């Protein structure tokens, strides 16, 4: 059963207009915050609610906000990270197109909490409709007096600037996003110093995901306790899961955290296409390890999925049935990372390319036995040695698929053709 | 001294607070490999080869960017570190082409060295290497991205040192990294080339052979060459360079990183400016004039001719019938020996090295106006200033490394830079907070107006400066004609702009004033110097430097190449010391300066001259006058390396060795004396200056037995401050400073009297001279590489004037003055003030001095299309 | 006395018979210069500079042979062709300095210089022993096929000349 908290109004085709959004309760939280809640209390509320970042890392949002130095004389900035490029993920798109005012309101609340007067909205260049709707929503908010100088007489100023990205997955990484926002190439930067202390233009900056911000109005209106009542002990609230792959009803499903993966795949998503047996499932976007069917009963929350050997990540569930060649899956994911690497640090720049080329060779049937060990060694050399987590993410598909499906690799190498394809007598690619 | 210790590989390593692990380890002698780190650039951690293991931290950390904290335990040789290092090298080598046999960097390549030291000796890569193809027909993928720089993208290891140097150090935008992942290419912006003045540095600091330059390309292997340490002779910054030679041929010049001066970056003029040494135009043998033509002859014949003729002239006119000119580019030893030759052997005090001054000064005036001199200051004082005022100087072209220091102050300490110039300059576009363009000749008025504006401000605090209220108010009253709107009318500078500059100055804690060649050439030069001193008095704390025109002008002034002072800046009263030292009499009265000499020749009082590497016919502002005067001389001996305009009029020419063929010391504008080694023995039949002077002295009757520069240095050493090194070997890397005690106490304020020059209705344009891109002075046109950047002279005009005259880029225009005319191709300059023309003075085919008159204050010309 | 007799009747005849035996054996002497024995395969004689199959020189003037030569017998100056490639403008070996160790052949990365079997190049003047590039290059077109088994047949590996098994 879906818990429609964030997506309750996205079905309404007029939700993106200001009138309809206000009818459905938009900006109530904002007015409440401006009138009644002090920024420090707001941070405490969010901490108490247990909201964790929805971008993939799952860092507690309230804690992140509290890293901003309060006595700093520099301006503080908020960035909303709408550069959603993780393969399999399309949850933010739903919110940007279907309920943009919720996101705008979330940005306002977050800005108020950290004392920011200029917020930036960084949206992936390919999301055309999302950018149009968000820009319109922001313009409407200015018109209504919810943004600008001395908002609703409270003495608080806030401006939101919209910035379109140029089409790079790396700009979803926070330091590369800041580089891109400053006008430079989207190259990752070293951390420390962390963005919360020295970020955009060397000022304290908070970067939050779209979904995280969309939760804030609900937390403010209904209270931290109410929010903490959803979900599990350590993973509170709901998440939008994008289910794709071999399922009958792919799409976005908003669930309370702790929902069982089996119920999601076989229940809401309608089960596997053609009712074939399940082969592998990626629970949180391509940067998370693959799970075997025996983990189908894992609960979808941060701890349980981690205990099962993977990560909740961005909540993109990719389902593969028995006719999927795992080597081919690893190859196309490696191609993605090779293409999206920013090129600053050597291991990721050269290593992702090398991994892709080896996988392509194995998949085409020209592999050698040493290649598997070479792949694992390259992956070991990349992991932990890069500036940003893209390097770590790139090696995850390789390591996890070799660990769990080594026999397929060996078959490719020894026989020069695909095990799955030979088994099912499919047409060769 | 260190603040605390960290442990690296079991050793205790001292750390100064703020240092990174890498800096501390390198200082202690522990080797950590680097590619993308450079001591002068902000660390980026891009190459990942300096990853080290630090206990209690989960992942390996980059040593170049991790600040060392007390109690850190670092391992640079643990198994994990070694494996990762091999992994990074393997990643780089995976797509690095097998170009070592043909790559110019072979033998000095960081990748080669590190692979031998830390890498694996096998490869497990079976995929073909990535290749960026430039030309499908060739097997070599070299792309010319600038006049001198060639890029081979396959070899690039993406350390980004090149783009960072261009961006962070030079403040230029010539080079960038395009695309992402391993397709990243280093290129200039589309449609442009990399041709900024510091572009050679990216070749020197590229760790591999991805960026190479044309002068080293396919010429020689680095292990065959020998290096010598020299000081660059082109400008008074005095950067330290190395010349690389093999079989006595010079192949390249690189930097010799001196933190006092250049921090490891040299400009392209120094880097490629050694080529004139091997130019085919050099004078190879002595020449004498027979029946009107110059013919080659032997040293013996030339010297005997000189002896015979000087004897004749001396018998008629005695010592005062002779003069000597010496160029500022020579070493101190040659200058000292030359003035000694003139004073002791020939008996004349008519010696000078300054060719830009037009107004004749009586000896008394000359001495008293010497009161305004540069303060004692060094490069690092520029960095510590919070406001830098550049007055009358195209700093970017005249002192490129000082300009880099100004940019460094802007980048690291947020210094504000104010330019006050008669024309817009490249530094203005790159690093200036405010750029003020004043009308040529009105700089003193501008400064006085500025002082008035500063005093006028609310925030001006009279107690912070050492002037009394009475002095300030008297000054303001006297200054009223130059303040506010009235001053603006004279200078052409808007009042609000002056007010903004005043704001910045009044708020400054530490001001540094750099005054350059336009101050020297200003018609009100002396008043301008006094105005600068006035400005200094009104600032809380300010230093000023009058940048000397050439590389050893300071040395020439110090070692007596002027008519009214003796070596060591001694006054005429101390002459007995020198007579004692040189075992003989020297003339009683001070001599004549440049213009005095020229006028004396005109009046037949002087008949013989020695011109030592100087070219008054080309430099002195009134070319025709000088030429006619020089032709009057009975004996003109020119000692030079090239056939200059003056040499063409000579009776005897003696070939002189260039900077790379002599050893000696030079003094830069900091008054730092530095030693330059000899790189190659003298070419052709040229001789080093000291040897020529010793031969002449010997032939004319006095033996000093000091034909080697080191001998001359021994004698010069008595004029140095106590404790200074007396042998070349004792001069260390830092050189030493020859300074007198601080001469500039805030003295009385000087008042200005400004008379506007007459307006000529026919000649309506003002003539300004400057340097062309990649040129400085008269020697750069003999370097073929520098001529690739700007190969021919131009006539710089503003857009407004170009439209008026219907002239576009490249059209021939005629520049004419009362005295002469010049024809050149027009070049339209952006943001150039109208009714002015800029001509470069670096090209022999366009003599700018024939347009100038020695009685004129400002040079006016008219412009017409051909 | 017995000893003397043994000497006379035993040792001396043995010696004489040995002489006679050897006198009728075929001599080992080779009548040089009319007969010439071929040298061993790894014999190091006069150098020669090789070419690719299209005639272009292999030597790129990298300087490794000169650097590795223990007798400092090689001098070279590189230059650039119109195609932008590196080649040796001047390449000289002083065969009198050379000790025929073969280090240059081992050091060469381009399979350009080899030591052949030629040993008959005596002369009467010292300056005739400076062998220039023209003297050292193999003749083109070849009169006899090259004795060298090359690893690299062409300057740059292109798709066409890649061995089949490496194509994907």
Image (spheres, coloured by chain):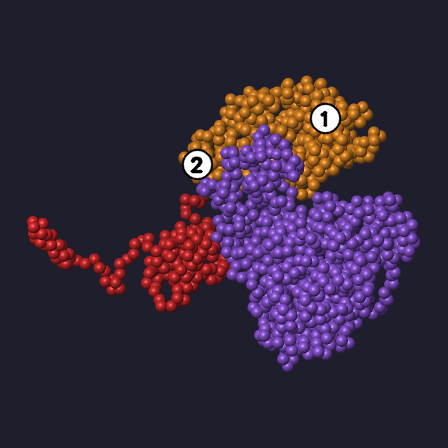
The vertical placement of B543 against B358, above or below, is above
The disc numbered 2 marks a residue on which chain? A
Name the element at disc 2: helix
The answer to whether B734 appears left or right of B423 in the picture is left
Among the 4 quarters of the image, the one containing residue B421: bottom right
Q: Nearer the viewer, residue A67 or B386?
A: B386
Crowding around mark 1 (Cα neighbors within 10 Å: few <14, some 14 to 19, many 20+) is many
The answer to whether C94 appears left or right of B50 in the picture is left
Q: How far across and how far down the image is residue B740, in percent?
A: 74, 54
Lower sequence index among marks 2 and 1: 1
> Which disc is residue A370 wearing?
2
Q: Chain C: give its colour.
A: red
In this view, the mark in front (2 or 1)? 2
Q: Which residue is mark 1?
A: A216
Q: Residue at the spot x=77%, y=26% of the render?
A: A39
The vertical placement of B528 against A220, above or below, is below
* Chain that appears purple: B
* Chain that appears orange: A
Q: How far across and how far down the image is residue B654, in percent?
A: 62, 71
Q: Quadrant of the C terminus of chain B?
A: bottom right
Q: How far across and how far down the image is residue A186, in percent?
A: 64, 41
Name the element at disc 1: helix
Crowding around mark 2 (Cα neighbors within 10 Å: few <14, some 14 to 19, many 20+) is few
């Amino acid at each position: 059963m879906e818990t429609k908290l964030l997506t309750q109004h996205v079905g309404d085709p007029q939700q993106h207009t200001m009138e309809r959004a206000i009818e459905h309760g938009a900006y109530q939280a904002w007015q409440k915050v401006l009138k009644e809640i002090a920024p420090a209390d707001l941070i405490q509320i969010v901490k108490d609610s247990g909201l964790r970042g929805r971008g993939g890392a799952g860092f507690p949002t309230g804690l992140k906000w509290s890293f901003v130095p309060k006595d700093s004389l520099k301006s503080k900035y908020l960035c909303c990270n709408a550069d959603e490029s993780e393969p399999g993920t399309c949850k933010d798109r739903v919110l940007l197109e279907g309920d943009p005012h919720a996101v705008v309101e979330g940005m306002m609340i977050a800005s108020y909490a950290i004392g920011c007067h200029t917020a930036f909205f960084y949206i992936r260049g390919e999301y055309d409709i999302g950018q149009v709707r968000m820009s319109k929503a922001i313009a409407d908010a200015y018109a209504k007096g919810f943004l600008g100088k001395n908002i609703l007489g409270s003495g608080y100023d806030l401006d939101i600037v919209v910035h379109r990205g140029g089409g790079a997955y790396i700009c979803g990484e926070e330091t590369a996003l800041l580089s891109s926002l400053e006008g430079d190439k989207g190259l990752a930067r070293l951390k420390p110093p962390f963005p919360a202390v020295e970020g955009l233009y060397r000022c304290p900056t908070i970067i939050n995901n779209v979904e995280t911000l969309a939760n804030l109005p609900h937390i403010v209106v209904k209270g931290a306790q109410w929010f903490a009542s959803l979900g599990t002990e350590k993973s509170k609230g709901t998440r939008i899961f994008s289910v794709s792959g071999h399922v009958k009803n792919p799409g976005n499903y908003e669930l309370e955290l702790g929902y069982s993966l089996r119920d999601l795949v076989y229940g809401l998503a309608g089960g596997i296409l053609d009712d074939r047996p399940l082969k592998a499932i990626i629970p949180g976007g391509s940067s998370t390890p693959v799970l075997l069917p025996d983990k189908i009963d894992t609960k979808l929350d941060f701890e349980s999925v981690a205990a099962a050997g993977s990560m909740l990540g961005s909540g993109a569930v990719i389902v593969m049935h028995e006719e999927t060649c795992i080597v081919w899956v690893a190859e196309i994911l490696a191609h993605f990372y090779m293409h999206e690497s920013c090129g600053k640090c050597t291991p990721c720049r050269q290593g992702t390319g090398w991994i892709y080329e080896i996988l392509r060779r194995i998949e085409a049937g020209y592999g050698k036995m040493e290649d598997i060990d070479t792949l694992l060694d390259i992956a070991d050399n990349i992991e932990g040695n890069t500036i940003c987590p893209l390097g770590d993410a790139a090696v995850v598909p390789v390591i996890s698929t070799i660990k769990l499906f080594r026999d397929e690799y060996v078959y490719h190498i020894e026989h020069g053709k695909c095990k799955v394809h030979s088994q099912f007598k499919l047409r060769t690619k | 001294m260190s603040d605390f210790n960290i442990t690296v590989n079991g050793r205790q390593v001292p750390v100064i607070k703020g240092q990174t692990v890498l800096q501390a380890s390198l200082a202690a002698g522990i080797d950590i490999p680097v590619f993308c780190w450079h001591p002068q650039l902000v660390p980026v951690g891009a190459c990942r080869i300096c990853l080290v293991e630090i206990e209690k931290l989960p992942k390996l950390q980059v040593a170049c960017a991790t600040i060392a904290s007390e109690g850190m335990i670092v391992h640079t040789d643990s198994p994990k570190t070694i494996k990762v290092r091999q992994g990074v090298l393997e990643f780089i080598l995976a797509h690095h082409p097998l170009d070592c046999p043909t790559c110019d960097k072979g033998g000095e390549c960081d990748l080669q060295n590190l692979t031998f030291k830390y890498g694996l000796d096998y490869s497990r890569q079976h995929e073909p290497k990535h290749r960026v193809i430039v030309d499908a027909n060739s097997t070599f993928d070299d792309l010319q991205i600038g006049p001198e720089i060639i890029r081979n993208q396959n070899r690039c290891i993406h350390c980004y040192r090149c783009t960072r140097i261009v961006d962070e150090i030079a403040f230029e935008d010539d080079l960038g990294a395009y695309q992402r992942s391993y397709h990243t290419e280093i290129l200039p912006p589309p449609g442009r080339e990399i041709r900024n003045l510091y572009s050679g540095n990216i070749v020197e600091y590229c760790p591999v052979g991805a960026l190479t330059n044309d002068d080293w390309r396919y010429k020689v292997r680095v292990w065959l060459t020998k290096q010598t340490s020299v000081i660059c002779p082109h400008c008074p910054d005095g950067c330290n360079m190395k010349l690389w030679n093999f079989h006595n041929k010079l192949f390249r010049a690189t930097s010799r990183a001196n933190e006092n001066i250049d921090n490891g970056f040299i400009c392209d003029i120094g880097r490629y400016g050694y080529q004139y040494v091997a130019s085919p135009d050099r004078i190879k043998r002595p020449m004498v004039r027979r029946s009107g033509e110059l013919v080659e002859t032997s040293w013996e014949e030339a010297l005997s001719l000189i002896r015979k003729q000087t004897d004749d002239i001396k018998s008629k006119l005695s010592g005062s019938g002779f003069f000597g000119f010496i160029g500022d580019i020579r070493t101190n030893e040659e200058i000292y020996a030359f003035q000694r030759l003139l004073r002791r052997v020939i008996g004349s005090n008519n010696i000078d090295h300054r060719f830009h001054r037009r107004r004749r000064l009586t000896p008394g005036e000359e001495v008293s106006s010497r009161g305004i001199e540069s303060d004692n200051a060094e490069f690092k004082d520029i960095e510590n200033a919070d406001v830098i005022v550049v007055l009358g100087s195209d700093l970017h072209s005249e002192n490129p490394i000082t300009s880099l220091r100004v940019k460094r102050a802007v980048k690291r300490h947020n210094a504000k830079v104010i330019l006050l110039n008669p024309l817009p300059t490249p530094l203005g576009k790159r690093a200036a907070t405010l750029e003020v363009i004043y009308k040529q000749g009105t700089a003193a008025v501008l400064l006085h107006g500025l002082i008035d504006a500063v005093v006028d401000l609310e925030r001006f605090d009279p107690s912070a400066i050492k002037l009394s209220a009475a002095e300030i108010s008297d000054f303001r009253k006297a200054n009223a004609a130059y303040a506010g709107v009235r001053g603006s009318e004279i200078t052409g500078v808007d009042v609000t702009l002056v007010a903004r500059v005043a704001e910045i100055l009044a708020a400054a804690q530490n001001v540094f004033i750099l005054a350059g060649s336009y101050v020297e050439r200003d018609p009100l030069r002396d008043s301008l110097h006094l105005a600068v001193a006035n400005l200094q008095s009104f600032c809380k704390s300010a230093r000023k430097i009058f940048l000397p025109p050439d590389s050893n002008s300071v040395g020439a002034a110090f070692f007596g190449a002027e008519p009214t002072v003796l070596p060591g800046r001694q006054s005429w009263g101390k002459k007995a010391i020198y007579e004692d030292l040189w075992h003989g009499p020297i003339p009683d009265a001070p001599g004549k300066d440049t213009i005095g000499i020229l006028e004396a020749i005109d009046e037949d009082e002087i008949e013989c001259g020695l011109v030592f590497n100087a070219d008054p016919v080309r430099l002195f502002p009134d070319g025709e006058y000088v030429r006619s005067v020089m032709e009057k001389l009975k004996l003109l001996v020119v000692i030079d390396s090239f056939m200059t305009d003056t040499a063409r009029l000579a009776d005897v020419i003696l070939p002189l060795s260039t900077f790379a063929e002599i050893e000696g010391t030079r003094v830069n504008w900091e008054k730092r004396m530095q030693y330059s080694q000899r790189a190659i023995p003298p070419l052709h039949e040229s001789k080093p200056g000291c040897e020529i002077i010793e031969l002449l002295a010997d032939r004319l009757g006095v033996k000093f037995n000091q034909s080697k520069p080191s001998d001359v240095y021994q004698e010069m050493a008595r004029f140095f401050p106590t404790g200074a090194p007396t042998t070349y070997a004792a001069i260390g890397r830092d050189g030493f400073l020859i300074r007198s005690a601080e001469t500039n106490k805030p003295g009385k304020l000087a008042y200005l009297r400004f008379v506007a020059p007459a307006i000529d209705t026919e000649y309506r344009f003002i003539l300004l001279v400057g340097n062309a891109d990649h040129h400085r002075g008269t020697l750069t046109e003999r370097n073929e590489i520098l001529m690739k950047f700007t190969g021919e002279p131009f006539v710089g005009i503003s857009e407004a004037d170009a439209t008026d005259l219907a002239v576009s880029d490249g059209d021939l225009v005629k520049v004419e003055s009362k005295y002469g005319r010049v024809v050149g191709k027009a070049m339209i300059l952006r943001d150039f003030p109208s009714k002015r023309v800029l001509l470069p003075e670096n090209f022999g085919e366009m003599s700018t001095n024939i347009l100038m008159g020695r009685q004129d204050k400002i040079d006016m010309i008219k412009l017409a299309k051909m | 006395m017995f000893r003397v007799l043994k000497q006379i009747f035993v040792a001396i005849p043995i010696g004489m018979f040995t002489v006679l035996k050897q006198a009728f054996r075929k001599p080992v002497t080779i009548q040089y210069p009319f007969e010439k024995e071929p040298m061993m395969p790894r014999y190091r004689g006069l150098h020669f500079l090789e070419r690719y199959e299209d005639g272009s020189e292999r030597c790129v003037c990298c300087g490794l042979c000169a650097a590795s030569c223990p007798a400092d017998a090689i001098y070279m100056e590189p230059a650039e062709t119109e195609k932008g490639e590196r080649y040796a403008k001047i390449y000289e070996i002083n065969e009198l300095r050379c000790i025929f160790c073969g280090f240059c052949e081992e050091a060469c990365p381009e399979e350009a210089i080899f030591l052949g079997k030629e040993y008959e190049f005596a002369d009467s003047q010292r300056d005739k022993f400076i062998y220039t590039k023209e003297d050292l290059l193999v003749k083109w077109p070849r009169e006899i096929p090259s004795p060298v088994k090359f690893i690299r047949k062409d300057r740059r590996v292109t798709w066409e000349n890649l061995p089949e098994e490496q194509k994907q």
